[in-house]
Image: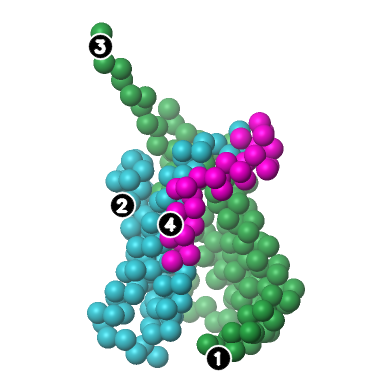
Amino acid sequence: MTSAGPIETWTTILTVAATAVAGDVLTAGAMRRIGDLDEIRAQSGLPGAIRAVVSSRMFLLGVFSMALSFFSLLFTLSNVDVSLAAPASASLTFIGNAAAAKFFLHENVDRRRWIAALFVCAGVALLAH
Amino acid sequence: MKHTLTPQRYLILLAVILTASFGDVLLSHGMSQVGSVSIHNLGLLFTALKNPWVISGIVLLLGFFASYLTALSWADLTFVLPSTSFSYVIVALLSHFWLHEYVSPYRWLGILMIVCGVGFVANGPSLTEHPLPVSEPQ
């Protein structure tokens, strides 16, 4: 079914992965700024916790990026086989998240976490077969 | 300080895994009943919203998002993502045993690799300890 050339195929797959990484990192960064949701819920109840989350601009930007990723995946799927597009974008997202979490969220991505990301990335790619 | 998780927090991670995998499988089962949606019959998507399997799938995926955000509020992204990727394994098992899809040897190998990846992070610290900024000496 793949009707796109290699450049278009990989550009759309990279767009899906990049917007997914942006969405994940922005929501994770927002949750780190907001603080422990369990504690917020204990203090101001579930409505307070929901209010804390949805009033964060960073969180809303993250959700917007996730929506962009979803629609770019839909666009990709209309031109590229799902057996290539889905695992390729999911695997690239895993690796991209590890790098972005290290640089933007300053997470300690040690060897253990890199190996985990690579194993999961390879595993997701194999699931397509 | 090494951040390890309390049993309650492990339950949240389990909720992320189960709601993501069961949500996807219920949506898939519901959409197989609704039929193929194309650009010419987008109205079928509204019909899909009346399907009980699709509704249950959406409710579970909302639960997934809530528990995923809760997990991100006390654990690193690079801990939560590999740990919860176990949901891929659950989806493969459910599609094999419940939806009777064929799971090839490559897929079983992929499942094994994901399990190994989860094992690598599961025993590690869940949160990076950021030292407080050191104040300038007077």
> Which label's residue is closer to the chain start, 4 or 2?
4
Mark 3 to mark 2: distance in Å? 34 Å
* Chain painted cyan: A
Question: Is A65 colored magenta in this rendering?
Answer: yes
Name the amino acid type tagged 3: Pro
* Part of the protein shown in magenta: A40-68
Q: Position of residue B44 (x, y in %)?
A: 64, 84
User: Which residue extends farthest top?
Assistant: B138
Q: Going 40% across and 91% down the picture, which residue do you hit? A: A1
Q: Which residue is mark 1?
A: B40
Q: Position of residue B7 (x, y in %)?
A: 62, 39
Question: Could you say which quadrant of the image residue B56 lies in?
Answer: bottom right
The colour assigned to chain B within the rendered structure: green
* Closer to viewer: mark 4 or mark 2: 4
Q: Which residue is mark 2?
A: A99
The residue carrying pointer 3 sits among few (fewer than 14), some (14 to 19) or many (20 or more) residues within 10 Å by Cα, namely few
Q: Secondary structure at mark 3?
A: loop
**Disc 4: host chain:** A
Q: Going 35% across and 48% down the picture, which residue do you hit? A: A101
The tag on residue B137 is 3
